[in-house]
Structure formats: C-alpha cells, structure tokens
Image: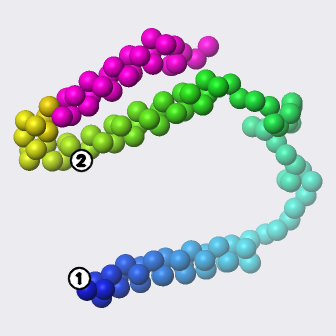
C-alpha cells in the first residue's frame, strides 16, 4: 500500500478546514455585533424562564430516548444485510430472521412493561 494514494484525502481535509476557518473568521469580522440586554436575556421557548434550571427530568424521557437509540441502531444492522442479501444465501437469511425475532421479542417486552407509554 502506497501512502501517495491518501494524498487527495489529506488535501481535501486541509482545504475543507481552511475554508471552514476562513468562513468563521469572515463571519466574526464582518458580522454585526450589537448586543443589548433583550438580545442577551435568557429565554425558554419564547417564555421567561420559570423554576429551577437544575430540575429533574422524568426518567421516562431518558428511557424512551435510550429505547429509540437502541432500536434505531439495531435496525442499522439490517442495511448491510439488505445489500448483500443475494450473496449470503439461506444462512444469512436465517441469521437475520433470528435477529429480527429477538428484536421483536424485546419490543413486545418493552411494550408490555409500559416503557413506551407516555402519560
């Protein structure tokens, strides 16, 4: 393997970094900077902030987020199989069938336990 093959990639990274830095610098230099108290005030979805900023979120919010990420990542494992489905044969088919069965059992378990209910 020759390192000269990677020169275009390195050149692309360097040029992209330089262009990004130049655009950020141009925005900082040329952009208007007129701060006022109204612009710098803290807001919460258009409303004045209320309550303590360190209040606890409901655990269900985090649970639903983790479940979404977990199932989303597991579904991402299906894309390589879908691309290579013609080459893996019946062994690949049954492997993915078992994988999807396990996913379905996990989904049903979460559904029955009420983890997906938002009250």
Is residue 112 in the magenta section?
Answer: yes
State the mark number for residue 45.
Answer: none
Against 116, residue 37 (above or below) is below
Residue 26 found in image quarter: bottom right
Is residue 32 in the magenta section?
Answer: no
Residue 34 in percent (x, y) is at 86, 65
- Residue found 86% across the figure and 33% down from its top: 52
Q: How is the image coloured?
A: rainbow
State the mark number for residue 1.
Answer: 1
Q: Nearer the viewer, mark 2 or mark 1?
A: 1
Residue 106 found in image quarter: top left
Quarter of the figure that contains the N terminus:
bottom left
Quarter of the figure that contains the C terminus:
top right
**Which of the pair 54/118 is nearer the observer?**
54
Residue 94 in percent (x, y) is at 14, 31
Task: Name the residue carrying label 2.
Answer: 80
- Residue found 30% across the figure and 42% down from its top: 77
Residue 99 in percent (x, y) is at 26, 31
**Which of the pair 80/31 is nearer the observer?**
80
Pointer 1: residues within 10 angstroms few (<14), some, or many (20+)?
few
Residues in magenta?
95-119
Report helix, strand or loop for mark 1: loop
Against 118, residue 9 (above or below) is below
Residue 33 is left or right of residue 20, and the answer is right
**Which of the pair 29/97 is nearer the observer?**
97
- Residue found 91% across the figure and 58% down from its top: 36
Q: CA distance from mark 2 to mark 1?
A: 26 Å
Against 119, residue 48 (above or below) is below
Callouts 2 and 1 close, C-beta under 8 Å: no
């Amino acid at each position: 393997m020759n390192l000269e093959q990677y020169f275009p990639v390195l050149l692309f990274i360097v040029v992209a970094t330089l262009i990004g830095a130049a655009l950020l610098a141009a925005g900082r230099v040329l952009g208007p900077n007129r701060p006022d108290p109204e612009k710098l005030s803290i807001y919460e979805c258009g409303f004045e902030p209320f309550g303590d900023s360190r209040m606890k979120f409901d655990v269900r919010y985090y649970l639903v987020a983790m479940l979404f990420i977990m199932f989303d990542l597991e579904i991402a494992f299906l894309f390589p199989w879908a691309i290579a489905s013609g080459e893996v044969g019946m062994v690949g088919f049954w492997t993915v069938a078992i994988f999807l069965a396990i996913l379905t059992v996990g989904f049903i378990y979460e559904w029955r336990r009420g983890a997906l209910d938002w009250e």
